[in-house]
Amino acid sequence: MSYHTDTNEGAEYLLMGNDAIVRGALEAGVSVASAYPGTPSSEIIENLAKASADRNLYVEWSVNEKVALEVSFAASIAGLRAICAMKQNGVNVASDFLLHVALSGTRGGLVLVHCEDPGALSSINEGESRHFAKMNEVPLLEPGDFQEAKDMTKWAFDLSEELRSIVMMRSVTRLSHASGNVKIGRLPVPKTRAFFSYSGPMLDPETGPVLTMPVPPHHALLQEKIRKAAEIFEDSPFNTYTGPARPELMIITCSACSLYCREAVHLLGAEKRTGILKLGTTWPLPPKLIRKYLSSTDTILFAEEVLPFMEENVKVLASEMASDIGIKKFYGKNDGTIPMINELNPDILVEAIKKILSIDYTAVDPAYAAKAKSFVSSMAPVRDLTFCPGCPHRASFWNIHNALAMDARSGFVCGDIGCYTLGFLPCGFNTMKTSHSMGSGIGIACGFGKLTRFGMDQPILAVCGDSTFFHAAIPALVNAIHTKSDVIFVLLDNSGTAMTGFQPHPGTSFDAMGNGVIQIDPAAICRSMGATVEFADPFDIEATQDSLLRLLEEKGARVLIMRQMCALSPEKKGKKKYDVSVDQAICVGENCGCDRLCTRIFRCPGLVWDFERGAAKIDDVICAGCGVCASICPSGAIKKTEASG
Amino acid sequence: MKKVALLKDPYNLIITGVGGQGNVMASRMLGNALACKGFYITIGETFGVSQRGGSVMSHLRISKKSAWSPQIPSGQADVIVALEPTEAIRVIASYGNPDVTVLSNTRPIYPVGVIAGELKYPGIDEIRAALGGLAGTVMFINATEEAIRLGQPILGNVIMMGAVAGTGLIPFDTDDFCAVMSESMSGDKLASNIEAFERGKTLVRAPKSE
């Protein structure tokens, strides 16, 4: 039985945080779900898509987060419940629309789940999107464990309908991608009829047109919703306290950090001295509840990730209440007790609490720790991130790197987010020199391309993936073509959103639910805008480098589509195209004039160095059989033959 | 629910390896098997970069009482299962203690820095000595070699999980493995997984493995 469809109320599953969110949405009777993939949020839509047939859902991977929110919003104002998921920086993309949704209000429950990545475990930022809730005057919830992730998701829809406001719910990697026991609840019959009522009075929230104008009355209404939310939050079961009535130290925490706090207090044996106030409703804060707990002690520690969001908001309330509750001693991020970067963990909390309460505790014997650390530095070689064996990006960057080296005008590559971001590392031959938000490679390149009048004559390339192309690269490419910017736009087309698990995008022929959809051709889009478009197979080293060298001689906006399927693509089914081997009789090792080009420079994990024989060799367990290395060995020692079967 | 005891509560197990070795699958399988037996299980894992050559780690907390932090505190691991031997060293340095039990696969996966000749990869005897000086018990298992012998190198993780069962340290055995695996596979595939699991069990029962 799958947790998506199990109607056995009270059954228990070991669920990832994201699965718990999925179950919560299903228990709320959600009808529409939309998202753009991004770690650690992607499993939400993937799993709702699995339930789509059984539960009569419409589930889509949208072209970007802003459109995803627009799609979910439409369902809401047609009276259905909808969920929209994204990673932290997705909220930045959706934020313009979010501002207006807050102001216009919603009808059917609308929940925006943003899964954030403190510590940037799989991101190129550790952005905090909780501030968008405060900035746009939207209620914010943060589940503290797996059961809450489910229960709170379900409640978020009720809250949204009660307030007629979108509700934001924030998860983090250590909840979304962690797993714990979850008891499931009842599955309702979802609404099946959508209808948009718009003929009522202008300001009628249920029957009028849905606008933000006139702005001041809408804004007043929005602020009334936030006041009401604060009242509701006073009694929320998601704000919990564990500890003595008058603790020496009160820890105010939220999200996964509440688990770290509990663990730290347990390790220190400080249960009788410490209270943990875990807030599930972090914006707006419920003032009476805060007053009650601030009154119970004089010493407060804040534990949250990443910025001091809750800390600063509690301090505002504390200063308003100071004449009643007295002056408090606060520990947290602003005084440096807790770091303001990176994710937290139980050890950070142990250090903070033991310092504040003067507890003597040593986690690990220092002599043991020192010995272990010395073994790591001498015996556990660092595992730099690298492209997978058989990854087309290694070949693409090899071609770009070599073409730019031959061109010799200090050319460079602007990139953005995707597996190909690793192009800035040795595995991409350090070819990528800028990397920012989705689609920004071509935008930045477009700007560089207009600097010729200031004497800039370096060739400029931009790369982006096929999913990113649709997400945010098109407007920048329009700009580049329109302004006759001198750039080469390289589309690294590996046939899917590879980094996050092969979600479909507008260039693929199927949707999230597996249905056929209209496939949009990036080449046709580029041509229709007036760009010349060429194709190359990055595994064909010679032809690709020839194309690049020719394009480097030309002016204006040029498009090169490098097309080769991701090595991990489900379509490849793990089959090798070539059997690759090294003829160690031909490989002359260190004596070859190539300076071990194959292993020192090309660095594919499947092509290793045989230290005993002083020659290259293929690791058959790891090699993906792309055969590219056979083209780079100057001695012709690497052989490839078509794989049998 | 069967009555089963834990040696410690929470009991902390770390499975480590390199992206693509089946780390996440192993932790979920074990977690599901134990959750079915009535334990609270918390699994923390880092897999955003798992397919891109990085070190991967799953933290598994087993408890009769509650969920725990998805990150194990420093020095609190009870068992470390390493699908790659140098990863055992990396993990024991952060989470080890003199009583920890280490089960390590013997087959190296070279980091690109080693392939490039910039970094040195230690010999298995050096790794053995280092782990021996830090852990209570160390068992080396030729999991990948055994899996190749079974015709499927990818089953190295299942052999390692069989080895975990063989130690008897946690309430987890072939029946539990079969129950979880049969939910997602059947026929020959299930049979080869069970064969690999059983092989893993025998490898720790043999005197000090290998």
Image: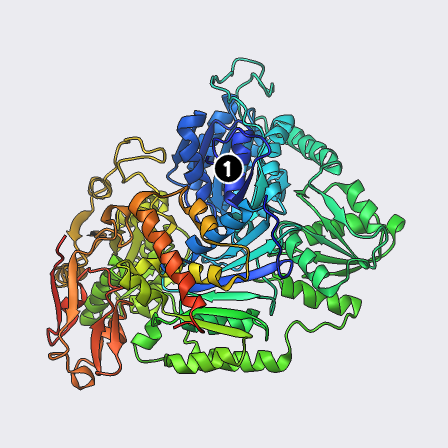
Q: Please indicate, yes or no, whether residue B80 appears anywhere in the rendered image.
A: yes
Image quadrant in which you'd find residue A351: bottom right
Task: Give how far across and how far down residue A572 sits, in percent.
Answer: 23, 49
Identity of the residue drawn at 58% across and 15% down: A201
Q: Is residue A555 above or below residue A176?
A: below
Identity of the residue drawn at 54% across and 57% down: B60
Task: Give how far across and how far down residue A621 sits, in percent.
Answer: 27, 64
Front in this rendered view, residue A8 or B151? B151
Task: Give how far across and how far down residue A81 sits, in percent.
Answer: 52, 27
Q: Is label 1 in a helix, a strand or a loop?
A: helix
Image quadrant in which you'd find residue A585: bottom left
Query: What residue is shown with label 1?
Result: A22
Q: Is residue A547 left or right of residue A286?
A: left
Image quadrant in which you'd find residue A518: top left
Q: Which residue is outermost to the top?
A: A199
Q: Which residue is outermost to the bottom?
A: A591
How many labels sit on residues?
1
